[in-house]
Image (cartoon, rainbow, N blue to C red):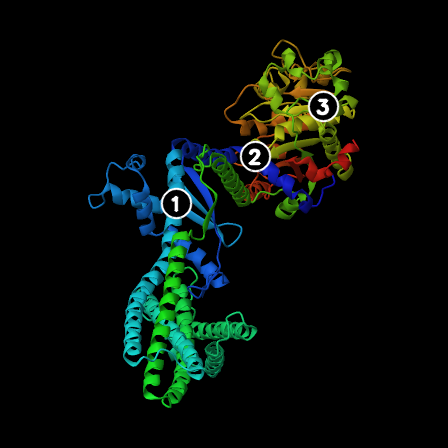
């Protein structure tokens, strides 16, 4: 028969291996499945309550002179909130916000350690069960809380959001609160100076009766006043920023032992040029303000824009240098360090600019001081007193206005956090994920089972294809017999006779002939067109045996009249093969005798549901017992054999073949096929096979029939096949595909190495049909 290429049937072969080892696969799947089911059943359900918040309303604050809308600030702010949510201090704040009844929902373990009280346990539980992650955009985060109680999970999740909002508002208000407190202190100082200046001016006017200045002096006074106001404003801003810088540097030092050097210690040629540029622009800006240019003047606005750009460039360059120096160790976006570092550098840049402005203002005031020296004595005193009052008055109202702005901003601050989706009570447990666990268990079990099956099959080293068998045994493979999917009894309709009606109905098991279930273990042949109606592989199975018969007749014409069929070990299908080969020969018109030569485990009589006795052993042993005397060489011993039922052997026209009680007719028998069962069981069958009586029996049969098929025992461990082989023309070795290991086959072949037996070849049995005929097209030919 033709064989397909091995590579085209790989998947089919795997499927067949799985079918053969389905118990292994079942165990590998059922064990993890049972574990998963047990886990799903015994694990207490965990519920997850989730909420979504967004960080919005980032903007530049002119009062604090800080750009909160910058990308770096927003990124760091979100990252710091993620870290804050997992901090123990935050969990403690959440615990404090929960009421006593809600805290009672937390189940305390029975064996709580002595060093941990209930409060500490709940705080740790809250910290461990908080889950945070960023959403689709960087400014959106998901906040979840896990609990065995769905109501508790919801309450705690919403409490987490409330605490986060309060902390954010508190943090934002602290910025303005610090500024307001500083302004209150400055107002008290300036107010006292203003009162003293007004009192001194009033006393001077009373004593000298000089109440006003001339026009030139008033103009100088106005400019000096502007310069003094600017100087005080610069001084106030510088003090506030210096105080803030000290706080930032202290916090920075607390989080990092080795801090980064200040801007003053960080210097490169580029940074020096940027500093000089910033100072130059600050000088120009101060000059315009002293000359009474308003804030909305185009020149003033242009200089302010240039100052902002110079600050940004200077800060970026400084950060890049510090980053290189520290190998990115402090610019960690998930910590507070970068925010402190950026704010510190920004404050140092502001201080440098303010120092430059203060120096320029001092230069302007010194120039006006030289002009004031030329004024008369009383007029110079009046000028000085009036200037002090104006300066302190402007400073007082400016500070008062800024204090009010800071108070309003402090009260109106709502933070950056916006709740997009509050937590709702969950109804479906988050854990255990029952369907996922079952799916994973089945998948892992199936994969493990497949791997074990493939490993087991690969260790067998059993041949799968005719090419592998031929290479292994150096014997030809005469035929490949396909595996029968449905275990049914296939018979040739030509030999059914009056019982042919039995098989018209495919429910064959209803007939008494099939009452013995052992009959269904042997896929026997049947012929005719009706075969194709009982499964896809009936005709292929029939044609395989036709091919085997033809192969024997063509390769050894008129030379093979008696064959022995054996196998290396039991259950490889040798008996079925012997029966079907005999049926095939009978169908083709050959007078055929099927002999059950397996005295150890006879089974042909069970297949055909006929009596095992009398059979071969009875025939041979009876003959030996009768022929105790010397037999005439011209007389056959069969003429003198006495039948067990009183009959006799006759060699007439209807001689031995038709009338012997040892050759039985059954439902399967016809005038072309007779069956010689094993007969009574004997203790030493090897003596029977080597007896002269058996030799004469087979010789007589050769003269009366066309073809003899002997079903022999397996080769390994039994000597019968070796003895039978001397009485036949050839031996067929039945090999079960993908099941018989290589070492077993080699040992079986070696049994005939030192005998005169003729090993015709191998018949590969139970081969997947797709391996022989392909997937669909060739089979449809039949």
User: Which quarter of the figure is the C terminus placed in?
Assistant: top right
Q: Which residue is mark 3?
A: 534
Q: Which residue is mark 1?
A: 162
Is residue 135 in view from this perspective? yes
Tally of numbered discs:
3
Q: Which residue is mark 2?
A: 20
Q: Check the image and report above or below for 557 versus 681.
A: below
Whichever of callouts 2 and 1 sits on the residue coming sooner in the sequence is 2
Q: Check the image and report above or below for 680 versus 483.
A: above
Q: Are marks 2 and 1 in contact (CB under 8 Å)?
A: no
Whichever of callouts 3 and 2 sits on the residue coming sooner in the sequence is 2
Depth check, front residue: 350 or 525: 350
Whole-percent x, y for residue 288 in the image = 49, 78
Whole-percent x, y for residue 621 in the image = 57, 20
User: Which quarter of the figure is the N terminus placed in?
Assistant: top right
Residue with the most extreme left position: 114
Q: Residue at x 27, y 37 (%)?
A: 109
Question: Residue 407 appears in which quarter of the rendering?
Answer: bottom left
Q: Residue at x 49, y 59 (%)?
A: 59
Is residue 622 in view from this perspective? no
Q: Which numbered dot is residue 385?
A: none
CA gap, disc 3 and disc 1 = 76 Å
Element carrying mark 1: helix
Q: Check the image and report above or below for 745 versus 692.
A: below
CA gap, disc 2 and disc 1 = 63 Å
Residue with the most extreme bottom position: 374
Query: How packed is label 1: few (under 14 Cα within 10 Å), some, or many (20 or more)?
Result: some
Whole-percent x, y for residue 270 in the image = 49, 81
């Amino acid at each position: 028969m033709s064989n397909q290429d091995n590579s085209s049937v790989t998947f089919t072969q795997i499927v067949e291996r799985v079918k053969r080892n389905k118990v292994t696969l079942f165990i590998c799947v059922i064990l993890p499945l049972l574990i998963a089911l047990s886990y799903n059943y015994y694990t207490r359900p965990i519920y997850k309550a989730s909420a979504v918040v967004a960080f919005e309303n980032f903007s530049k604050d002119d009062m604090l002179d800080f750009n909160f809308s910058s990308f770096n600030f927003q990124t760091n702010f979100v990252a710091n909130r993620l870290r804050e949510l997992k901090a123990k201090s935050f969990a403690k704040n959440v615990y404090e916000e929960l009421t006593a009844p809600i805290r009672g929902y937390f189940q305390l373990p029975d064996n709580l350690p002595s060093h941990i009280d209930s409060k500490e346990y709940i705080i740790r539980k809250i910290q461990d069960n908080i889950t945070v992650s960023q959403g689709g955009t960087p400014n959106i985060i998901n906040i979840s809380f896990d609990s065995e109680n769905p109501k508790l999970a919801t309450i705690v999740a919403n409490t987490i959001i409330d605490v986060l909002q309060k902390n954010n508002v508190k943090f934002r208000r602290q910025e303005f609160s610090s500024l307001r407190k500083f302004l209150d202190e400055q107002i008290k100082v300036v107010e006292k100076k203003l009162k003293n200046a007004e009192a001194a001016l009033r006393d001077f006017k009373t004593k000298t009766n000089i109440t006003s200045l001339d026009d030139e002096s008033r103009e100088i006074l106005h400019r000096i006043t502007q310069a003094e106001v600017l100087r005080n404003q610069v001084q106030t801003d510088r003090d506030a920023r210096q105080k803030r810088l000290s706080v930032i540097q202290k916090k920075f030092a607390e989080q990092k032992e080795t801090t980064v050097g200040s801007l003053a210690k960080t210097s490169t040629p580029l940074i020096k040029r940027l500093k000089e540029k910033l100072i130059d622009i600050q000088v120009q800006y101060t000059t315009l303000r002293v000359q009474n240019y308003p804030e909305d003047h185009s020149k003033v606005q242009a200089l302010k824009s240039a100052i902002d750009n110079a600050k940004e460039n200077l800060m970026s360059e400084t950060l890049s240098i510090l980053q290189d120096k520290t190998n990115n160790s402090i610019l960690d976006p998930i910590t507070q360090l970068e925010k402190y570092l950026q704010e510190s550098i920004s404050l140092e840049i502001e201080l440098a600019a303010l120092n430059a402005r203060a120096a320029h203002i001092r230069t302007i005031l010194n120039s006006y001081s030289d002009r004031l020296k030329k004024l008369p004595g009383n007029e110079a005193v009046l000028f000085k007193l009036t200037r002090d009052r104006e300066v302190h008055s402007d400073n007082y109202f400016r500070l008062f206005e800024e204090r009010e702005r800071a108070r309003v901003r402090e009260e109106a601050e709502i933070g950056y956090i916006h709740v997009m989706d509050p937590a709702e009570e969950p109804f479906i447990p988050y854990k255990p994920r029952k369907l996922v666990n079952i799916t994973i268990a089945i998948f892992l079990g199936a994969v493990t089972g497949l791997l074990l099956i493939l490993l087991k099959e690969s260790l067998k080293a059993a041949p799968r294809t005719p090419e592998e068998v031929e290479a292994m045994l150096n014997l030809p493979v005469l035929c490949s017999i396909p595996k029968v999917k449905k275990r049914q009894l296939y018979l040739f309709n030509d030999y059914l006779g009056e019982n042919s009606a039995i098989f018209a109905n495919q429910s064959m098991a209803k007939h008494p002939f099939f009452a013995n279930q052992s009959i269904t273990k042997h896929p026997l042949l049947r012929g005719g067109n009706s075969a194709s109606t009982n499964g896809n592989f009936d005709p292929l199975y029939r044609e395989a045996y036709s091919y085997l018969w033809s192969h024997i007749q063509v390769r050894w014409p008129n030379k093979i009249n008696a064959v022995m069929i054996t196998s290396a070990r039991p259950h490889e299908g040798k008996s079925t093969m012997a029966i079907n080969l005999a049926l095939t020969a009978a169908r083709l018109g050959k007078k055929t005798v099927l002999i059950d030569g397996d005295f150890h485990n006879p089974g042909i009589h069970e297949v055909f549901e006929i009596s095992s006795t009398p059979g071969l052993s009875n025939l041979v042993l009876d003959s030996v017992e009768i022929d105790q005397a010397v037999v005439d060489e011209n007389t056959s011993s069969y003429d003198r054999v006495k039948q067990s039922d009183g009959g006799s052997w006759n060699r007439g026209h209807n001689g031995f073949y038709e009338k012997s009680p040892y050759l039985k007719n059954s439902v399967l028998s016809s005038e072309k096929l007779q069956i010689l069962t094993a007969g009574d069981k004997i203790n030493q069958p090897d003596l029977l096979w080597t007896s002269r009586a058996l030799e004469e029996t087979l010789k007589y049969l050769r003269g009366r029939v066309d073809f003899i098929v002997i079903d022999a025992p397996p080769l390994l461990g039994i000597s019968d096949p070796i003895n039978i082989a001397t009485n036949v023309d050839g031996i067929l070795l039945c090999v079960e595909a993908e099941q018989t290991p290589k070492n077993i086959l080699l040992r079986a072949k070696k049994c005939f190495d030192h005998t005169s037996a003729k090993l015709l070849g191998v018949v590969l049995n139970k081969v997947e049909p797709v391996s022989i005929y392909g997937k669909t097209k060739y089979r449809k030919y039949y």
